[in-house]
Image (cartoon, rainbow, N blue to C red):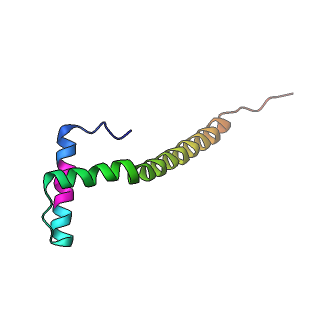
Amino acid sequence: MFDRFSKEQQQQIIQSIQDFFLEERNEKLSEFAAERVFDFIKESVAVHFYNIGIQDAHAAVINQFASLDDELLTLERPVSH
């Protein structure tokens, strides 16, 4: 599911992981170790963020349809008897 990162994106993420470990833990992480952390995040953590994103998208679509429904109702014309 999370294998669609471009090579450039993966390198940026790995660099960010290395930077984080250096700044927060004063630990220099090798590229291989940072890749392992990235793999762990993709396999174990990312799905939670993905699911939240899906829930947020669902709520946004529901809100848009509710708004559209209201707008359509304002277009109705009275029927004369």
Q: Quadrant of the N terminus?
A: top left
Give percent across and percent down for residue 63. 57, 46
Q: Residue furthest right?
A: 81
Q: Residue shown at 55%/48% (left/top)?
A: 59
* Chief SS of the magenta region: helix
Q: Nearer the viewer, residue 40 or 78?
A: 40
Q: Which quadrant of the rendered structure holds the C terminus?
A: top right
What residue appears at the point 17 percent right and 51 percent down from the top-left corner? 32
Residue 79's place in the image compared with 66, above or below, is: above
Question: Which x, y percent locates residue 44?
Answer: 40, 52
User: Is 24 contained in the magenta span?
Assistant: no
In this rendering, the answer to whether 54 lies above or below 25 is above
Q: Nearer the viewer, residue 75 or 12?
A: 12
Question: Which residue shows up at 17% across the image and 69% down it?
Answer: 23
Q: Magenta part of the protein: which range?
A: 12-18
Q: Is residue 15 left or right of residue 40?
A: left
